[in-house]
Image (cartoon, coloured by chain):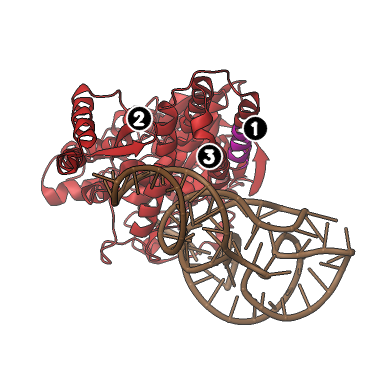
Chain colours: A red, B brown
Amino acid sequence: MRFYNTLTRRLEEFREIEKGKVGLYTCGPTVYDFPHIGNNRAYVFEDLVKRFLIHSGYAVRHVMNITDIDDKTIRKASELGVPLSAVTQKFIDAFHADLRALNVLPADVYPRATEHIPEMVGLISQLLEKGFAYEKDGSVYFSIGRFPNYGRLANVEPESLKLGAAVSADEYEKEAVQDFALWKGKKPGEPSWPAPFGEGRPGWHIECSAMSMKYLGPHFDIHMGGVDNIFPHHENEIAQSECANGVAFVNFWLHCQHLIIDGQKMSKSLGNFYTLSDLLGKGHAPMAVRYLLIATHYRKLLNFTLEGLEMAAQALSRVKNFVFSLKNVGTEGEADAELAAAVQASLAAFQKNMADDFNVSGALGEMFDLIGKVNPRLNALSRADAANLLGYVERVNSVLGILEPDDQGPLDAEIEARIALREKARREKDYARADEIRAELKAQGIVLLDTPAGVKWKKE
RNA sequence: GGCGGCGUAGCCAAGCGGUAAGGCAGCGCUCUGCAAAAGCGCUAUUCAUCGGUUCAAAUCCGGUCGCCGCCUCCA
């Protein structure tokens, strides 16, 4: 498989460091607010990459950090007048709830910054000893002038960095404006930890360096995040990690583009700031959201609209209907060799598209192609054919994650009984009674399908 | 100022040198007691625009127009 490596700005064939294994680090949330749909795009994309790696036979070790100490979490806690942990725990729970709803596979570890202060202090000490960092007024800064490769990931020249308002507003003293804080000296009212270089708290960037190193080692395969993380966050991670360890940090950097809402940047003032729970509250299905989020290539800006969400839901139902039909095939018989070959070819084409920089649209196209080919001969299918096709859908879905396992449960006896009553009424031409039962079931979210092969039902 | 991206049917979206995937919507049809659901069929001589390279270009090169992102804590 190949994908676009931000570090080299080229499509590169993926090569793992240790055969068959992948060390994966994804930048997790800063837990000062509810995750919004844009955050979710990044998480879902990262999940897609991870699922495809697993699908391709790799053993993936996935680490996703949780930033539970930074300017924003501190500010929030102080605004609300509650302990930091009270704020962060609430949003950590919300974060996990979203991931579950979106069918995102859990990471192996979710390290929290506040639980890794000693590792960070140790890393900063190393950087101080090696002369890559300096203390000033109780804070410690990284000296980017000491790292010749600084700016490689973001493709920027350190000297050319625009010095904007944020720099002049910085309350900490630095030698060079581009230098960034590794450790921020204690300020009144802020949480702090002891350190050889003075009481204080860690800067944001050092968290990820310390935690990725602890769980994945100094050199690992893939690091992902949103495009906004490229500079300065990931650039700084590289600088810190490589200076401390003296080895290359990460081989492949993958960055997910942002999404916009109705053609405009998401912002609270415009009122287009969706969270997943907003959408679910309006009756949208989480799997439709997931479908929409993955259907646009990850390096393209995604224009998120409610109309698009409806379209995604419809497309998804085509897949669900296909699965439903397959589960209702009842004909005995041999498996069709030609069909089996078509299934094989489709799966290979699906994988080929995914292996080409995660071309989900192309991969989905292959899947729908097969569905379109099979649908006309649904009635001629044998059980063996259906099982083969269901296996195909399962394989594809192990990557896409758009079908929930309980989409079609076992037949419920109560529902079956109601259907039998309706059939009896129909036979007796008591259509009023039959329609009544149909309406009742519909109200329970059960849709009846009167097919030539008898009545079938499914959940809406 | 610096770095970068995009413009393909009503909408979403692949294709990246060999003659326009797929999804949604729409229209027609099949099935049906009627519906619903589902299924089937149809729907871009053309890829913002102008010019160039080539036997061949949506795909490569140059110009123009339009839209957008990032440049210190925002996924």
Q: Which mark is residue A345?
A: 1
User: Percent position (x, y) of residue A145?
Assistant: 55, 50
Front residue of B51/A25: it is: B51
* Residue A290 rendering spot, x and y as whole percentages: 39, 43
Q: Main secondary structure of the magenta part?
A: helix
**What chain does mark 2 sit on?**
A
Whether residue A235 is visible here, answered yes or no, is: no
Name the residue: 37% across, 62% down: A166
> Which structural element holds mark 1?
helix
Same-chain check, marks 2 and 1: yes
The boundaries of the magenta stretch are A346-356
User: Mark 3 or 2 closer to N-term?
Assistant: 2
The percent coordinates of residue A394 (x first, y second) are: 47, 27
Residue visible at 40% across and 37% down?
A: A320
Is residue A354 depicted above or below A218 in this figure?
Answer: below
Chain at numbered mark 1: A
Depth order, front residue of A289/A145: A289
Q: Is any part of residue A91 visible from this angle?
A: yes
- Residue B53, picture quadrant: bottom right
Kindly identify which numbered label has been placed on residue A110: 2
Q: Quadrant of the N terminus of chain A?
A: top right
- For the C terminus of chain A, the image quarter is top left
In front: label 3 or label 2: 3
* Residue appearing at x 59%, y 54% in the figure: A155
Upstream in sequence: badge 1 or badge 3: 1
Q: Secondary structure beneath disc 2? A: loop
